[in-house]
Amino acid sequence: MSESTTDASEEGDATITLYRLQACPFCERVARTLSEYDLDYQSRFVEPLHSERNAVKRVSGQRAVPVIIDERTGVTMSESERIVQYLDRTYGEA
Amino acid sequence: MELPFDVVDLGPAEHPQSGEAAPDFERPLVTDEYWEDVALSDLTADGPVLLVFFPMDGSFPATYIWNEITERGWGSDDDLTVVGLSISSPYEHKAFISDADLPYRLFSDPQNGVAETYGIVHDLDGMAGVSEPRPAAFLIDGDRTVEYAWVAAEWPEFPDYDAIAAAIGDL
C-alpha cells in the first residue's frame, strides 16, 4: 500500500474543521462548497442523537450541525446557508 | 490458561520487528464524541504510541484486552499515547468506548488494510469474507521506530502485558 511510505496524513495542515453528521444533506452541502473552493478541511463526524452532541455544543454553543471552525479568520459558524454565504464571501472568486 | 487440547496455530506473521519502521497509515480515529481522520504519524509527532490491534468490538477478547489496559492505566500521563484498532465501524467504537468507559481512542479499519500493511491479517473461520487483524501490540517511538512488537501466534492468544509494561518502562 502506498500509504505505508512516508506521511499518511493528507489533511494535517487543514485550518478549517467541519463538524458533520454522516448523510446529513446540509453538511454535505457545506463539504461540497469547501471542495469547490479547494479548501483543506478536517471532518469530525458526530453523534446522530442531538442531545449527545456535547462536542458541538462546546465549540459553537448549540448542538446542530454543520458547524465550521475557520482558524484562519477565527470564525465559528453554524447553519449551512450562513456557512455557504460566508465561504462565498471569504473564498469566492467575486 | 491450560487447555486439554491444542488451540488454533496461526503460524508465523511477517510483521514489523523491533528496530524497524512502523508503517504509517491514516484512518478514522474515534473518541467518545466524534471521529476524524488521523495518521499514526500525527500521533507519534507527540511522542511514543502503543498501537493495539484487537478483535472486533463485542468479542470477549476485545473486552478483556481493554479492561486490562485500562486497569494498568497506560497512557494516563502525557508520555505515551495508547490507541486501538479493529475492523469495527466508528459507530461501534463509539458505543464500545461509551459502554466500557474507555479512556482511549480507537481506529476504525473495516477493510482491514492496516493489518495487511502490518502483515497480521487473520481470515476468520466461519465468517465468510471477514478478516481482521490478529491481536497484536506495537510500541512505537516518536520517529516511528518499533520498540516492541507482539503478534498473536495462536487463536486466541492475549498480549504479554508485563512485557509491554517493561518496554514502556524502557522508553
Image (tube, rainbow, N blue to C red):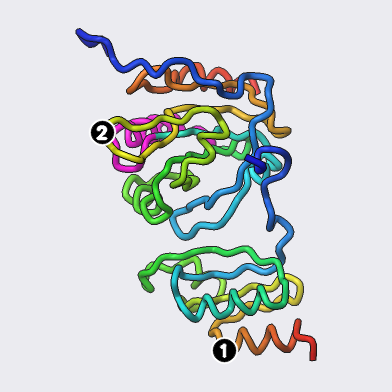
* Mark 2 neighbour class, 10 Å CA radius: few under 14, some 14 to 19, many 20 or more: few
Name the residue furthest front: B129
**What span is colored magenta in the figure?**
B55-75
Mark yes or no: residue B105 visible: no
Residue at image location 61% in from the left, 75% down from the top: A68
Residue at image location 32% in from the left, 49% down from the top: B99
Q: Amino acid at mark 2?
A: Gly
Q: Quadrant of the C terminus of chain B?
A: top right
Mark yes or no: residue A37 visible: yes
User: Where does the image place residue B94, in percent across and percent down from the top left?
Assistant: 40, 54
Give residue B64's quadrant in the image: top left
Label 1 in the same subunit as label 2:
no
User: Where does the image place residue B90, in percent across and percent down from the top left?
Assistant: 43, 54
Q: Which element is circle 2 on?
A: loop
Q: Amino acid at mark 1?
A: Glu
Give residue A14's quadrant in the image: bottom right
Q: Which residue is labeled 1 in the image?
A: A81
* Mark 1 neighbour class, 10 Å CA radius: few under 14, some 14 to 19, many 20 or more: few
| Front-lying residue, B89 or B1 | B89
Name the residue furthest bottom: A94
User: Where does the image place residue B19, in percent across and percent down from the top left?
Assistant: 68, 20
Q: Which residue is labeled 2 in the image?
A: B126
